[in-house]
Image: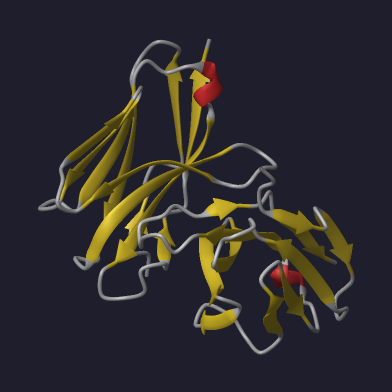
Amino acid sequence: DQQVKQNSPSLSVQEGRISILNCDYTNSMFDYFLWYKKYPAEGPTFLISISSIKDKNEDGRFTVFLNKSAKHLSLHIVPSQPGDSAVYFCAAKDRGGSNYKLTFGKGTLLTVNP
Amino acid sequence: DAGVIQSPRHEVTEMGQEVTLRCKPISGHDYLFWYRQTMMRGLELLIYFNNNVPIDDSGMPEDRFSAKMPNASFSTLKIQPSEPRDSAVYFCASSTTTGPNQPQHFGDGTRLSIL
């Protein structure tokens, strides 16, 4: 029973265009969400996060949007660059559980074509 | 600064053998996590420690898996006996306690293949 779902296993975009990666969750107790980026043969690295009290957080080319009523969040990358090609994981923290326990989605492979 | 260091990077062994994966967290980090990544289940938390004490091992799949943290700079994940279905990439991560929303820092993983 996946509580964090990334329904698109892969996404391909052209360099310079917008990349939108989506994530849905089912647990209404999730209060903090994170995006991690993973290159082949490396571990995931933290990218950006958002608290459930906000609906948007921006960091340079990366923006995360949270729609609590829809239990949906998305990561926007503008403009996309070939170096952004990686697997992106959505993760969530349960306010009712440990502050340090994250539930991850299965990831979306983003390919940015030059 | 050195990140989380895992060894070995790759391990190939035969079914039934004991496997030991090693992790050195970032110095000063109080939390250490072990994850497993598979195609079927994605990235799942196996166990995590706080100040060397196991806090939650509910993700450990079965008694064949055990984890220890004898000191603040070293942890092991052991599988005995190993089975082909244990083949996966195992990640170790660490974080600080300066706030519940501190991101976790991952090592580059150990790719384990059980034949």
Q: How many numbered discs?
A: 0
User: Measured along the vertical axis of the image, is residue B107 above or below residue B72?
Assistant: above
In the image shown, does A36 or B98 lie closer to the viewer? Answer: B98
Quarter holding the N terminus of chain B?
A: top right
For residue B57, say whether it is visible.
no
In the image shown, does A90 or A106 lie closer to the viewer? Answer: A90
Q: Residue at x 62, y 47 (%)?
A: A43
> On the picture, is B111 further left or further right than B35?
right
User: Measured along the vertical axis of the image, is residue B47 above or below residue B108?
Assistant: below
Pinpoint residue A110: horizontal percent, then vertical percent. Answer: 48, 31
Q: Residue at x 69, y 83 (%)?
A: B66
Q: State the colouring used for the structure image.
A: secondary structure
For residue A114, say whether it is visible.
yes
Q: Residue at x 88, y 78 (%)?
A: B17
Pinpoint residue B20: horizontal percent, then vertical percent. Answer: 81, 72
Pinpoint residue A26: horizontal percent, then vertical percent. Answer: 24, 63
> On the picture, is A70 further left or further right than B47?
left
Q: Name the residue at the bottom extreme.
A: B63
Quarter holding the C terminus of chain B?
A: bottom right
In the image shown, does B4 or B15 lie closer to the viewer? Answer: B4
Pinpoint residue B6: horizontal percent, then vertical percent. Answer: 74, 57
> On the picture, is B96 further left or further right than B39?
left
